[in-house]
């Protein structure tokens, strides 16, 4: 068995609506600068044959929709040549990262960040 780790900076480079929470006047919060970097962290576990047995992706975001998560899992399964059920995606649920889904309080996800 082999285990590999990867960390990639996913911090937005432009102002974005922040996930989870409102300003005191109930308007969506917008980023105003950089406090901490946001990351994508990946753990890959392979057999001695180097075939991926499990891939775990953790993103510093408030959430990901099932549709986005499923799309990512399908794309990744083709890249790393493994079955979709062997890929887990999780979000840390930070309230200080970009909004990733439209929501009831008016925050709008950045389409540029979503492509990233």
Image (cartoon, rainbow, N blue to C red):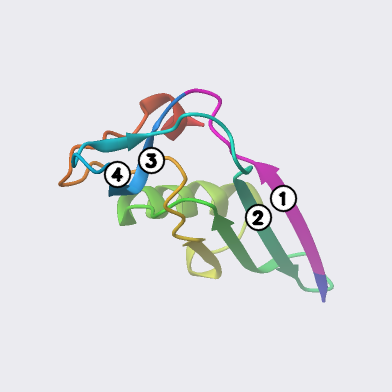
User: Crowdedness of circle 1 by 10 Å Cα count: few (<14), some, many (20+)?
Assistant: some
Residue found at x 77% / y 59%: 5
Which badge, 1 or 2, is on the more N-terminal residue?
Answer: 1
Between the C-alphas of marks 1 and 3, the distance is 22 Å
Circle 4 SS class: loop
Left or right: 20 in relation to 87: left
Q: Spatial distance from mark 2 to mark 3, Cα to Cα?
A: 20 Å
Is there CB contact under 8 Å for labels 4 and 1?
no
Which residue position is annotated with label 4? 101
Query: Which residue is tagged 1?
Result: 7
On screen, residue 84 versus residue 22, left or right, reads right
* Residue 74 on image: x %, y %: 46, 52
User: At 49% from the left edge and 23% from the top edge, which residue is drawn?
Assistant: 14
State the residue at coordinates (59%, 45%): 38
The residue nearer to you, when weighing 65 against 70, is 65
**Figure label count:** 4
Whichever of labels 2 and 4 marks the residue nearer the N terminus, that label is: 2
Q: Please report the bounds of the magenta region as a residue range.
A: 3-14
Instruction: Note whether 47 is above or below 30 in the view shown.
Output: below
Dot 3 corresponds to which residue?
A: 18
Q: Quadrant of residue 17?
A: top left
Q: Is residue 65 magenta?
A: no
* SS label for mark 3: strand
Q: Residues within 10 Å of mark 3 (few under 14, many from 20)?
A: many
In-image side of 48 versus 52 (left or right):
right
Q: Name the N-terminal-most of marks 4 and 1.
A: 1
Instruction: Name the residue carrying label 2.
Output: 41
Q: Position of residue 79 (x, y in %)?
A: 62, 47
Q: Mark 4: few, some, or many residues within 10 Å (few <14, many ≥20)? A: some
Q: Nearer the viewer, mark 4 or mark 3?
A: 3
Q: Earlier in the sequence, mark 4 or mark 3?
A: 3
């Amino acid at each position: 068995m082999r285990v590999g780790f990867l960390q990639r900076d996913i911090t937005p480079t432009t102002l974005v609506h922040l996930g989870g929470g409102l300003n005191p006047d109930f308007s969506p919060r917008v980023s105003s600068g950089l406090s901490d970097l946001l990351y994508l962290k990946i753990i890959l576990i392979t057999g001695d044959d180097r075939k991926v047995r499990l891939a775990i992706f953790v993103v510093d975001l408030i959430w990901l929709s099932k549709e986005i998560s499923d799309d990512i899992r399908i794309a990744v399964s083709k890249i790393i040549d493994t079955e979709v059920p062997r890929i887990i995606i999780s979000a840390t649920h930070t309230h200080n990262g970009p909004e990733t889904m439209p929501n009831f309080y008016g925050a709008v996800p950045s389409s540029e960040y979503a492509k990233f």
